Image (cartoon, grey):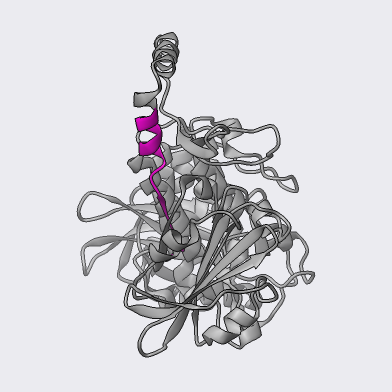
Amino acid sequence: MSAPDRFGRYRVVRRIGSGAFATVWLAQDEVLEAPVAVKVLADNWASRLDVRERFEEEARILRRADSDRVVRVHDIGELEDGRPYFVMTYADRGTLADRLKDGPLPVAEALRYGADIARGLAVLHQVGVIHRDVNPGNVLLRSGPDGTERVLIADLGLAKAAARGSGFTLTVGTPGYTAPEQARPGDTPLDRRADVYSIGAVLHHMLTGVAPKQDEPPVPVRSLRPEVPVAVDRVVRQALAPLPGDRYPSAGALADALDAAAVRMQEIPGAVLVPYQPPDREDNERIFRLDPAEDTLVFEPPPRPGRRRLVVAVVAVLVLAGGGIAAAVLVRDRRPVTVATTDGTVRLRVPPAWAAQERRTAWDLSRYGARPGVALVAAPDLTGWEDPDSAVPGVFAGRADGVRPQDLLAGSVAASCPAGAPRPLSGSGLTGTLTRHVCGSTAYAEAVLQPPDGAFTVYVQVKEPATADTADAVIRSLVVSSS
């Protein structure tokens, strides 16, 4: 069938692209004198009511989202031959797939795009829609009025309203970018975490130049591109976790993690972003090296070409001279590290060793009849910290709306251990108590605090050896900001 000359008041300029179901044209709005994109259903599908309904549903979803992060629909119509079309935002800088033809992106640019994509998907999730086909070809780039570049989510032909059912019966999506559960239709109901996986796959492509291999464990980004910071690698791997429950709970949480990784890069320019692997630990992903003699994590400065022998010689001289300057360096590097929940509303300062591994997650409060809260865990080794028989120290902190302090304390792992008398505690506009439990050689310090109106409860648990005395300082560093 011949190409259309116009769509109502929109004069066709040229074809932008085409797919199995539709063709997209660049057109000129002759009334508003602005370029637009027009998507028209292919003629061989126009008579199929199910395909036509999917096409029109896409327009309705885009209209409902109404966001600067998602392609907007401005008009809808029908050609004389019965083919439906809709008019939408024109992305003048093409697609992310076009950009990736030249290879992987700079890390900072990939993080920015990734966060923008995640927040665009979060908009769709808020209106009850799962995209199911997030890939570089469906991410559009548009120049903003200030000269910056904006990301737009597009092509929702495979999207489905989450509220319409708990399962899907059709395997859809682009190989390499779809979540594992999408290959098993009906086995596991899809939710927004399927899109989280797809964002992780797009991130992997932006950082390495290739998408993850289908049906294989995700290859660490750093094994393909060593200069990628460890913190960034961690974010991508968590987004690509095979099981939905191990991924970020939402696209917004993933965006926050990407923002945090970008800030971290700016805070420590030139740092050696490689993990130190002690023989007895499989995964210590942090930009610090473990100093066994000091039992702390020390910042690892970048090596300078041709100066390694000089640095070693200077260190040797300092040690022989009594280590005065070296001790000063260690004191500087042992400054507490701030850790925070994904939304930044709960923050604490912990010893550097405790920041070796962090987990920011949603806090399942269903046992208390409350909605999920935000929480964080920080420890030298998360696996050891979670083991009650292990002396690995660390901290858990979380916010629980609508949960009573006594209920949180009753469900604590330390509830069955001897406890000292509760001590009053206040700070950050909150008041509460701090209680120390001793379980053999391990101590648990628990703090529960509330604002004057009791609107929510903040719970902090510090685990440490019974002979240590770090908990008070960690708990008293707590800062809670309004949500």
- Quadrant position of residue 367: bottom right
- Front in this rendered view, residue 263 or 422: 422
The residue at the point 22 percent across, 69 percent down is 31
Q: Which stretch appears magenta?
A: 327-344
Task: State the image coordinates of residue 306 (x, y, percent, origin top left).
Answer: 40, 9
The residue at the point 55 percent across, 82 percent down is 371
Magenta stretch: includes residue 328: yes
- Front in this rendered view, residue 294 or 441: 441
Q: Is 158 rendered above or below residue 287? A: below
Res 78 visible: yes
- Front in this rendered view, residue 47 or 17: 17
Res 41 visible: no
- Front in this rendered view, residue 379 or 162: 379
Task: State the image coordinates of residue 225 (x, y, percent, origin top left).
Answer: 54, 31
Instruction: Count how many numbered circles sit on residues in the image.
Output: 0
- Left of 164 or right of it: where is 458? left
Q: Is 136 rendered above or below residue 282? A: below
